[in-house]
Amino acid sequence: MQIHWLGHACFLVTTGSGKRIITDPFDQRVGYPPPAVPADIVTVSHQHFDHNAVQVVPGGPAVVQETGEHVFGDIKITGHPSYHDQSRGSQRGENIIFVIETEGLRLCHVGDLGHRLEDDRVKALGEIDILMIPVGGYYTIDAAEAAAVVEQLAPAYVLPMHYKTASLDLPIAPVDHFLRYFPEHEEREVLIVEAGNLPVQMRVVRLTLFKK
């Protein structure tokens, strides 16, 4: 499996069989090049323009934007309810956490999570191999809260997302604020992972922007 970062909260997951999953696509207003990469499946955590621009993704993908279980051959995607803020959605609405299971791996994209996880939600999510988590604050959990969620879920890999860059004109913090909690972090162009070859110690990996 290969995972590339397309900017903001958008990742491209390519399975060993060649299936492509894109998470939270955005349009040109975000500042990054829109993720116009053909895909088989697109997940949408909530209905904000920087997460739901399904129209920019070619290939006629299946769109998953609801909670519950969704099965596409050997890919199972389960949406778990959560909130975009710390007041049960009263400020920014609801958010969906997606767990993607395929090839013996369990990936978790928490969308624009706005709060730490309740114990029953941690249990429901189960064991996570790869966690994609917002770290920029303001609209989502901030660096400290993200570090706490990482501790709650204890994944093998952590991929930070939704942070300030030179391309992004949003009032959120840069990734450095989060990386201070994990001084042994790595930088890569792509994360290549197999179920039988996960690290014993958790690794935080900042992916560089995918060059299409």
Image (spheres, rainbow, N blue to C red):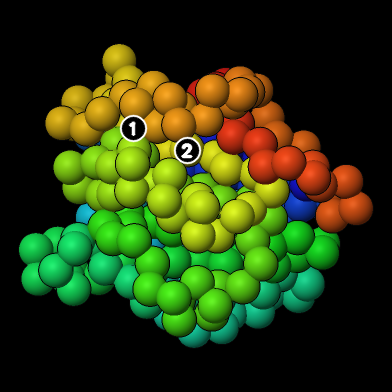
Question: x, y (%) of residue 195?
Answer: 84, 55
Quick one: label 2, few (<14), some, or many (20+) residues within 10 Å?
many
Q: Are marks 2 and 1 in contact (CB under 8 Å)?
A: yes
Q: Secondary structure at mark 1?
A: loop
Q: In the displayed image of the protein, which residue is found farthest to the left?
A: 91
Q: Nearer the viewer, residue 74 or 157?
A: 157
Say whether residue 50 is left or right of residue 178.
left
| Percent of width and height locating residue 188 | 65, 23
**Where residue 163 is drawn, which disc sits there?**
1
Query: Real-space Cα distance between discs 2 and 1?
Result: 8 Å
Q: Which amino acid type corresponds to the residue marked 2 in the rendered image?
A: Pro
Residue most extreme to the top: 166
Mark seen at residue 74: none
Describe the element under mark 2 as helix, strand or loop. Answer: strand
Residue 55 seen in render: no
Q: Which residue is mark 2?
A: 160
